[in-house]
């Protein structure tokens, strides 16, 4: 059931940590099952187009600083080298960008699934929109090794943290979902659920993989990701 429609507040890392205390482990019951986009990220070296295998033609543009065709622990993946935080100037060539309104959750049940491995403790892996973006945003990020799944809609923001650090260099499969009454985070089969309707989420930003698109490394960090991503799948209810 949807909660009271109040003004959404931006939740920082400390607040998310406190919210985690309210989380109960529960079976996954997300019903977002229609595939919107499916990126296998198995293009060869030097590729500049991230191909959508769903049949919907939602392809992405691969920045020149994203290494494609990388063989990592049995997988073909995209790779991001380490860059020191707050290193100016920002470099959007570290990003994969997908510009499509079809990737907005709107009021539907919505889920992002992906397989990744991280070798640094901080960085935004995937997002559409940012803090303060008109229409809200969603993101999957690492902070001090733990993974956050965050949705901010017109009603409120909801976010969950992984129980353990995931920057161990191993592959992890995660699902960051927004249901009609909760946000649900699944990490390697372990499920957390936080009740509360976020409200619709829709913005004009591209979906980005590897960091933020609107940043200056001064008052807004680019939060570039370090590691590898094997595949990404978007589903809607």
Image: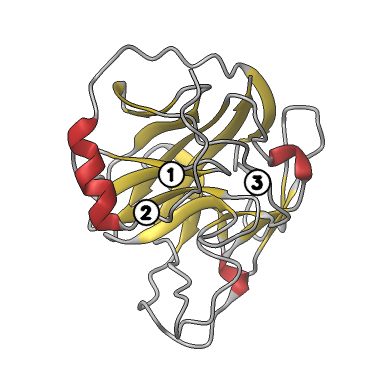
Spatial CA span between label 3 and label 1: 29 Å
Q: Quadrant of residue 170?
A: top left
Q: Nearer the viewer, mark 3 or mark 2?
A: 2
Q: Residues within 10 Å of mark 1 (few under 14, many from 20)?
A: many
Tell me the quarter of the picture where residue 218 sits: bottom left
**Residue 166 x/y as whole percent:** 26, 45
What residue did someone put label 3 on?
43
- Left/right of residue 173 with respect to residue 130 in the rendered view: left
**Pointer 3 or 2: first along the chain:** 2
Q: Which residue is mark 2?
A: 11
**In the rendered image of this protein, does residue 20 appear above or below residue 14?**
above
Q: Position of residue 158 (x, y in %)?
A: 41, 40
With 194 as the anchor, is 139 left or right in this view?
A: right
- Residue contact between numbered discs 2 and 1, judged by CB atoms under 8 Å: yes
Above or below residue 25? Residue 197 is below
Q: Residue at x 26, y 38 (%)?
A: 162
Q: CA distance from mark 2 to mark 1?
A: 9 Å
- In the rendered structure, which disc, 3 or 1, sits on the residue that comes first in sequence? 3
Mark 3, mark 1: which one is toward the viewer?
1
Please give the residue where the numbered disc 1 appears in the rendered image.
Answer: 150
Secondary element under disc 3, as helix, strand or loop, is loop
Contact, mark 3 vs mark 1 (Cβ under 8 Å):
no
Residue 65 visible, this angle: no
Question: Is residue 34 among what the camera can see?
Answer: yes
**Helix, strand, or loop for circle 1?**
strand
Q: Residue at x 32, y 61 (%)?
A: 122
């Amino acid at each position: 059931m949807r909660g009271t429609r109040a003004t959404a507040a931006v939740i920082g890392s400390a607040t998310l940590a406190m919210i985690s205390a309210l989380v109960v482990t529960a079976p996954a019951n997300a019903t977002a099952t229609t595939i919107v986009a499916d990126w296998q990220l198995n293009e060869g070296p030097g590729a500049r187009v991230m191909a959508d295998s769903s049949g919907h033609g939602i392809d992405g543009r691969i920045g020149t600083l994203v290494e494609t065709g990388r063989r990592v622990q049995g997988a073909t993946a995209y790779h991001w080298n380490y860059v020191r935080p707050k290193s100016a100037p920002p470099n959007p060539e570290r990003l994969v960008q997908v510009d499509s309104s079809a990737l907005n959750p709107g009021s539907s049940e919505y889920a992002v699934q992906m397989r990744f491995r991280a070798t640094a403790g901080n960085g935004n892996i995937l997002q559409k929109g940012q803090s303060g973006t008109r229409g809200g945003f969603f993101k999957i990020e690492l902070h001090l090794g733990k993974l956050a799944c965050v949705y901010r809609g017109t009603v409120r923001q909801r976010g969950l943290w992984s129980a353990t650090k995931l920057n161990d260099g191993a592959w992890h499969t995660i699902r960051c979902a927004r249901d009609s009454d909760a946000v649900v985070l699944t990490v390697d089969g372990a499920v957390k659920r936080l009740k509360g309707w976020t409200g619709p989420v829709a913005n004009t930003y591209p979906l980005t993989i590897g960091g933020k698109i609107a940043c200056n490394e001064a008052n807004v960090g680019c939060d570039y990701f370090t590691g590898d991503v094997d595949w990404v799948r978007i589903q809607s209810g």
